[in-house]
Amino acid sequence: MRFGLVGTGHWARVTHGPGLRAAEGVELVGVWGRSADKASQLATELGTTGYDDYAELLEVVDAVAFAVPPKIQATMALEAAAVGKHLLLDKPVADSLDDARALADEATAEGIASVVFFTGRFAPELRSFFAEVEETGGWRGGWCRMLASLDAPGNPYAESAWRREQRGALWDVGPHALSNLTAMLGPIASLQAVGGAGDLVHLVLTHESGSTSTASLSLTAPPDGTSFETGLWGESGTTLLPRATTPATDSLTRAAEELVAAAESGDSHPVDVVFGTHIVELLASAEAQLH
């Protein structure tokens, strides 16, 4: 399947580009970026072609992978879906509920395949954990703590404008938290949100199963105060989600290969744009409660 890559930033350079090149059944045929020079430079690094016209890229691909801010992704992915291109999306799929729903509706109407790159859902060690949790059952609740620092030395996203916006953590690490908690405790029916200092957000989630969980999220923690932990408790005790050891590049490769498989089979992927839109619904609900 011929893929185009949209984006030229750090995530596109170190994860999407190499991941697409390594995927079986995938041919990376072009890169588009808002800067034609950067697109050309990244394309050279990846051994492919740089495009300064998005419409021209769409003409030569079967699928598009996106590594751009959510607002840009939503617009460009909608354009790609409208002409029948399969979608490898980053999270969140959009930064507004209307845009997410429009994208999901278009993908459904066109009958195209989609996968959203919730990184943890494609790491083998986390998938094994999720499967074990499901088999064990009897879980009453869980928690997720993602306290990150954009100001930590060497953070490649320190200058990311959309992550620096108010409540940036909700829309950046929030999708990961909601995705992982869904994998462990089932679909989330509703949530309550309380804000703290900076972009700190606390969420209380009610799952369709009746279990509850919590998530604490920040991108503005002090560099020495960062903390990450996700866990479950229930009838069989307490257990922690293992740290992912699979490189994100390898997880991206798996996501691309599974998009190809979904396109060929016609079956929906578990974390497709419909699931991604549900995550945006939850994020939008939380944001409304915070204002």
Image (cartoon, rainbow, N blue to C red):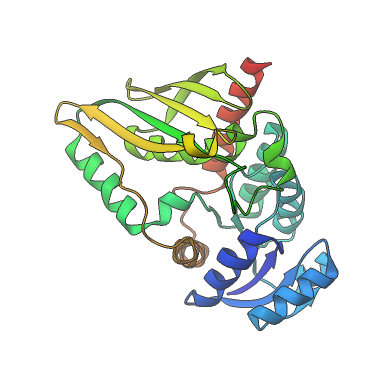
Seen from the viewer's position, the closer of residues 248 and 257 is 248
Asked whether the viewer can see residue 178, the reply is no
Which quadrant would the C terminus be assigned to in this image? top right
Residue depicted at x 71% and y 81%: 44
Asked whether the viewer can see residue 72, the reply is yes
Seen from the viewer's position, the closer of residues 198 and 96 is 198
Residue 238, position as x, y percentages in the image? 21, 31
Residue depicted at x 37% and y 40%: 183
Residue 177, position as x, y percentages in the image? 46, 36
Q: Quadrant of residue 230?
A: top left
On screen, 49 above or below 135?
below
Residue depicted at x 50% and y 22%: 202
Residue 62, position as x, y percentages in the image? 65, 70
Q: Quadrant of residue 140?
A: top left
Residue 159, position as x, y percentages in the image? 71, 48
- Answer left or right for 36 relative to 137: right
